[in-house]
Amino acid sequence: MSFEEIPHTADVKIHASAPTLEALFSETFNALMQVMYGTERGDGTIRKIRIESTDNESLLADFLSEALFLSEVEGLVFSDARIRINGYCLIAELRGESFDPARHSGGSEVKGISYSGLEILHDANGYMLDIIFDV
Amino acid sequence: MLEGLNRVGIYEWEVPVGYVPGMRVAGRFFLSESLAKTLEPGAVQQLANVATLPGILKNSLAMPDIHWGYGFPIGGVAAFSVDEGIISPGGVGFDINCGVRLLSTPLLHKDVSGRRDLIDELFRTVPTGVGAKSCLKVSSQSLDGMMVKGARWAVSAGYGVERDLMRCEEGGFMNAADTRFISAKAKQRGIPQGGTLGSGNHFLEIQVVREIFDPDAAKAFGLTLGQVCCMIHCGSRGLGHQVCTDHLKILESATKKYHITIPDRQLACAPITSPEGRAYFGAMAASANYAWANRQMITHTTRQVLSKMFRVEYEEMPLIYDVAHNVAKIEEHILDGKSRKVCVHRKGATRAFGPGSRDLPPDLTSIGQPVIIPGSMGTSSYVLRGTQLAMDRTFGSTCHGAGRIMSRTQAKKTLNGREITANLLKEGIIVRAHSENAIADEAPGVYKPSDEVVNVVHEVGISRLVARLSPLGVIKG
């Protein structure tokens, strides 16, 4: 289970892989938060969200877009997401803390989650994807 | 150059129909021999993908700052028939009406040279970076004003003077704004961010006019050699990002509903005349207006700082011009000798209307529209003017900036923010940012040289050089 940033000229491109779909979503979520706020992210605050969508890719994009929204309007920096997926319905418990300029200013603001080239692949080893964040 | 492309001019290449399946028209882009080395196959593919969209007119176009984006390439321009064509958020981007404006001052280079206190004060008063919130308290009523009347609202609220509006593309607001299609979430994001710069490539820069290429145009625009100016580059912040996110979802269903085949999900679209297409256009226009109001509010803060520190009158700092470089507009263009209404998408491209255009302020009608091209941190920015050739060839469009050539990952690995800051300081450029990463991310070396990019549009003739400005101080997110 891991994610890595792969070179992309304009934006941030992430490659993630994980044994389960839930873990893949969680990894991609961690990548998003790391791009925005760096690695020093604590917890203490919990937010729960529920997303319904039409396919796995949209479910992921909608989930990450909702996380971006919550993070921005509530000034929260998340460190972890516990996710359950049933069909194209997702329930997530997000753990995080309040934005602290001293520790969380090192990242890049993500403007949106792109659908360009987004495809969740599944084989015997698990799930993987490439995703572009517009920064 | 990549295989399968045809060179059709010294600076012009064609992407023939058939380069990707389903192309309705050919693609065309402008590039010099040396810039061609940095061209990515992904960007050409995206240019070709745009050519598959229904109702596209003439060509799918890209300017010399072409690079790999999502949906459209960055630097992409495409016009669609308003009757049979589509509108797509993939041709505008998440940062609706990301744009740039240039403010003049009566100050000279010697007045501001080495004045770290000026850059510090701007960094303190103009909110920048991730998580930045505005100090200009925006009420929900003011938010409506920003979305409906854009810079005009800002001026009536005291953040500027009437003349500023004459110097904004569209007079600082699009009439088509329809706030019914702005979600509660988008509004919630918009309220605390009115008057904030944001992060990434957005900046506020104190510059000096170093070179004048076209004295008549420079005079008409209000630029003189050695004059200090201020450039502001930012967009519609979280409100615009949310509008794009919300409408992408709606338009994805619409793409299926109207049986449109698209090669990339980020090109989700709907007929311009459909309810979904109209809703996106209304919401996009409202976001564009928010961005114009935002740049106007930052202008106000900047003028206040300069007034206080240099005893300059507010009126002595007129706006040169304000352009949008991520937007879709309904415009009239001549096609096959007839004037037609078309929907022009500019994704990382700037409007560059030529002399005689009705959209220009009366005193600039004979000159052409001012075009503002920001450089990357530490490099020159340019002012150009729009031309008739742009009207004939590119739906009145030109480049928007330097265009990235190095990824952020590579920039962070190979460049050091502290060293870059020190090197820029040696050249007399003061940089303030929230993090070293932000500086490495946007360092001069990660972009195509801006002078090469503007040289191509100048040589091709889709805009002409007027002046070059170089930075003295910059604040970044």
Image: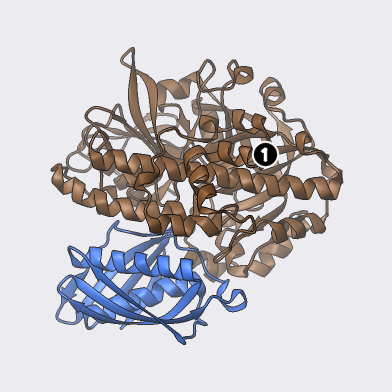
Chain colours: A blue, B brown
- On screen, residue A45 versus residue B100, left or right, reads left
Q: Chain of mark 1?
A: B
Do we see residue B1 in this rendering? no
Q: Is the residue B25 above or below the residue B183 in the image? A: above
Q: Residue at x 62, y 69 (%)?
A: B435
Which quarter of the figure has residue B367? top right
Taking the spot 53% from the left edge, 32% from the top edge, the residue there is B169
- Most extreme residue toward the front is B141
Q: Using the image as rendered, state which of residue B457 and residue A41 is in the foreground.
A: A41
| Label 1 crowd (10 A; few <14 / some 14-19 / many >=20) | many
Taking A46 as reference, is B153 above or below it? Answer: above
User: Going by the picture, which residue comes out furthest to the top?
Assistant: B337
B43 or B190: nearer the eye? B190
* Rendered residue at 72%/55% (across/down): B122
SS of the residue under disc 1 = loop
Where is residue A124 drawn, in percent x and y?
14, 81
User: The residue under label 1 is which amino acid type?
Assistant: Gly
The residue at which mark 1 appears reads as B160
Which image quarter is the N terminus of chain A in?
bottom left
Q: Position of residue B390 (x, y in %)?
A: 46, 25
Q: Is residue B466 above or below residue A65?
A: above
Residue A40, how many percent across, how many down? 52, 82
Residue B284 seen in this snapshot: yes
Q: Quadrant of residue B466?
A: top right
Decide: is A32 above or below B138.
below
